[in-house]
Amino acid sequence: MTKARVLRHPDFSKAFEISCDASGVGIGGVLSQEGHPVAFFSEKLNSAKQKYSTYDKKFYAIVRAFHYWQYYVFPNEFVLYYDHQALRYLQSQKQLNPRHVKWFEFLQTFTFVIRHRPGVDNKVADALSRVLTVVQSLSITVPGLDRIKFEYSTCPDFGIIFQEILDGHRRDHVDFVIRDGYLFRGSHLCLPRTSLRDFLVWEMHASGLAGHLGRDKTIALVEDRFYWPSLKRDVARKVSQCRTCHLAKATKQNTSLYTPLPIPHTPLRDLSMDFVLGLLETVRAHDSILVVVDRFSKMAHFISCSKTVDASLVARLFFREIVRLHGLPVTIVSDRDVRFMSYFWKTLWKLFGTTLKFSSAFHPQTDGQTEVVNRSLGNLLRCVVGDKLSN
Ligand SMILES: [Zn+2]
């Protein structure tokens, strides 16, 4: 407390730490992350509670702190820093009074670990919250994940590390920690050298929602959860072998030079807009996609529509999907198209003070941005739809 720094905002991807204490007349606590305080709390004890024993006061402080911050810490695992044996003392009691029973029941709704010395290993604390979630979510999707616990000791990549940590030589491997039999590096699950590596890489590249992302994005996805020494190389190899990617993605990159437009300085003020026409009709009779790209942030919106929509409908679509979210843009770049030529369309935009900058027809000069996005969209659609064209 004497070295308390400025409060910082809670980060829900990291583990919370709670430390609390009690004095004769009051209790207090600190909610922190990585040693930085996030919130404080203190409470004056009423005269009845001031008569509690020291154990009870300290226990009460924990209960109050958990109650106070339950919306921060629930349902993830967090660390309780505690310098007192009260909890252990209470756990060893055969007979508890009703007050203790109530408190115990309350504490049991939380998942936490008790540390007796604050600030021992922030890396471990940081990992805690995600470690549990990673294993839980994985064991649902990956049958037989718990078998890897027995593969570590014989794995050429992790065998030595695993053994040395088990032997208590953690100092040489501060990044690594074993929890529930799983080896973690930071918050990344270490995968031993088995076919599971290939399986998971494949899942993250080609499964239902993965959408065959490119090499770098797949690597980033895998790295976010897992670790093994040759991860980058292995993922790159697996992606380069993907048949769907080879078939669906054109190898040719930009076919002509794109001349840049004036560089936007603010997000969501300068948009570019294009249509992908003539796709297969969906159930709702949509066969085209209106692509709107923010030229500053490159954020793209894909709005399904029908080839036959007229200018006023496009305007309404645009208002419903873009203006609703981001407000009115200042400029819009677009291919010259009948839709945009519509008098109504122009008037509408003039009303709102937007300048339409028409790009010359079928020249990629001005509208490189959406052309690039359209190509990514095409790749994505081809990968996802594949042979099942009726989808
Ligand atoms: Zn692929």
Image (cartoon, grey):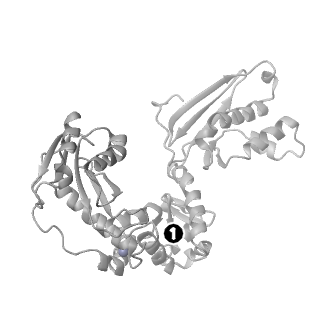
Q: Quadrant of ligand 1?
A: bottom left
The residue at which mark 1 appears reads as 161
Q: Residue at x 49, y 80 (%)?
A: 195
Task: Specify the quadrant of the image occupied by residue 135.
Answer: bottom right
Query: Crowdedness of circle 1 by 10 Å Cα count: few (<14), some, many (20+)?
Result: many
Residue 196 appears in view: yes
* Along the line of sight, the residue nearer the viewer: 179 or 275: 275
- SS class, disc 1: helix
Image coordinates of residue 82 in percent, x first then y, are 66, 40
Image coordinates of residue 55 in percent, x first then y, are 78, 34
* Along the line of sight, the residue nearer the viewer: 205 or 22: 205
Would residue 21 appear left or right of 186 to someone viewing this image? right
Residue type, label 1: Ile
Would residue 51 appear left or right of 43 to someone viewing this image? right
Q: Residue furthest right?
A: 95
Q: Residue at x 16, y 67 (%)?
A: 254
Image coordinates of residue 247 in percent, x first then y, are 30, 80
Q: Quadrant of the C terminus?
A: bottom left
Task: Specify the quadrant of the image occupied by residue 179.
Answer: bottom right
Q: Residue furthest top?
A: 47
Q: Quadrant of the N terminus?
A: top right
* Along the line of sight, the residue nearer the viewer: 125 or 382: 382
Residue 242 appears in view: no
User: Number of labelled discs?
Assistant: 1
Q: Residue at x 60, y 43 (%)?
A: 73
Q: Residue at x 35, y 78 (%)?
A: 244
The answer to whether the residue bearing label 1 lies less than 8 angstroms from the nearest atom of ligand 1 is no
Image coordinates of residue 332 in percent, x first then y, are 20, 46
